[in-house]
Image: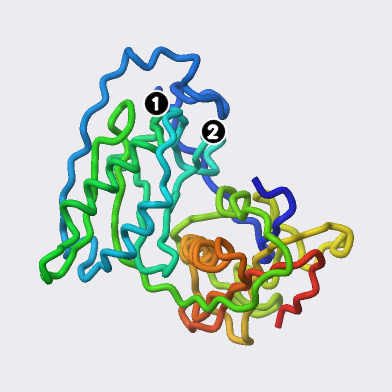
Amino acid sequence: MLQSSHLLLTSTLLSVSAARPSAEVELVTNKTSLAAADASNFTLNASRVVCNAAIYRHDLRGESCLDALAGIGDDQQYVSFGPRHTGHDFYIPLPYRWISSDGLCVFDIFIPNNHVADWARMNDFNEAAAHLTDECLSEGGEPSEGGIATGIGLHSHLSLIMTSYKPTVRCSNPVAHEPRDCDEILLTMLTSRGTQTFGPAGVPGVQVHLPFEMANGTLSPYPSPNYEAVPLSTFVALSFTRAPALASWYQIWEEVVAVEGMCADEDREGMAYSIGSRRNMFLELKGGSTRNTAVS
């Protein structure tokens, strides 16, 4: 986990409402595995795959989806999955995404029907993704389509979606040394889907003031008072041109995932651009031992 990576974001910490109380949450125990529980009491159901080009897009690139599949892993340890920022300490806070190195195919974990949480193994998602690629990707020249695998997890509350993605990402300079993992940013940042108005402080109607820095899920002014004192090997910057723009935290999270998967995993700096309703916001992922990037 990253200890000092920072996300330069907004000046308004958005409140996130707590999830409804549910007995399903009781199956989660503060980032512990299911090793202490009796997993033999549960019956695992085979995931069901449905391919649907109208919902999950078409013309998926087979090589890209197989590349994303290769990143899922096959860990056999049961861990908890549930929505982030609900007051519950899920091991994997959702949304969670695997993305191909070219950014063209993604696998998303999804909880349907208002379920709150479940236990699962990464190997369960690996097998579900393999079923999706087998069933939905064409080898005979016909258009490939996206799809969904349902019934994943000890209570069958989790689903996996395979779909295409069109990132606006440009990777640039190799970093001077191996960057730290970006997991702490990806697992703690806001992901709400409601749109907010991003822009400079003092502009009427702006809800989210730029620039801003977020570390470990906490927003603070950028640059922070201890800006030069905090060592940093990778960080993400959100910058803007003069006009305010509408965007959601989920859109920003998607671009952070894309830059991390396409650039940081290859030990390169990178940028996601054309974000927001005016396409005038961008994110930067920089490598280095000091933070010397200007935010315009």
Determine which of the numbered discs, if any, sits on residue 24 in the image: 1
Is residue 93 left or right of 176 when viewed as pictured? Answer: left
Indicate the quadrant containing the C terminus: top left, top right, bottom left or bottom right. bottom right
Secondary element type, mark 1 = helix
Is residue 38 left or right of 220 when viewed as pictured? Answer: left
Determine which of the numbered discs, if any, sits on residue 127 in the image: none
Q: Tell me if residue 194 can be seen.
A: yes
Colour theme: rainbow
Q: Tell me if residue 10 can be seen.
A: no
Q: Is residue 127 above or below residue 213?
A: above
The picture places residue 115, in percent across and down from the top left corner, at 34, 35
The picture places residue 36, in percent across and down from the top left corner, at 50, 14
Dot 1 amino acid type: Glu
Secondary element type, mark 2 = loop
**Residue most extreme to the bottom:** 242
Dot 2 amino acid type: His
Q: Residue at x 17, y 64 (%)?
A: 53
Q: Residue at x 56, y 78 (%)?
A: 281
The picture places residue 125, in percent across and down from the top left corner, at 34, 41
Instruction: From the viewer's side, name the closer residue of 231 and 210.
Output: 231
Q: Residue at x 82, y 67 (%)?
A: 290
Q: Is residue 32 above or below residue 249?
A: above
Q: Quadrant of residue 107?
A: bottom left
Mark 1 or mark 2: whose residue is earlier in sequence: 1
> Separation of disc 1 and disc 2 at Cα?
11 Å
The picture places residue 210, in percent across and down from the top left corner, at 67, 72
Determine which of the numbered discs, if any, sits on residue 88 in the image: 2
Q: Quadrant of residue 73?
A: top left
Other residues around mark 1 within 10 Å, as few (<14) / some (14–19) / many (≥20): some
Instruction: From the viewer's side, name the closer residue of 115 and 2.
Output: 2
Q: Is residue 216 above or below residue 214?
A: above
Is residue 62 left or right of 208 when viewed as pictured? Answer: left
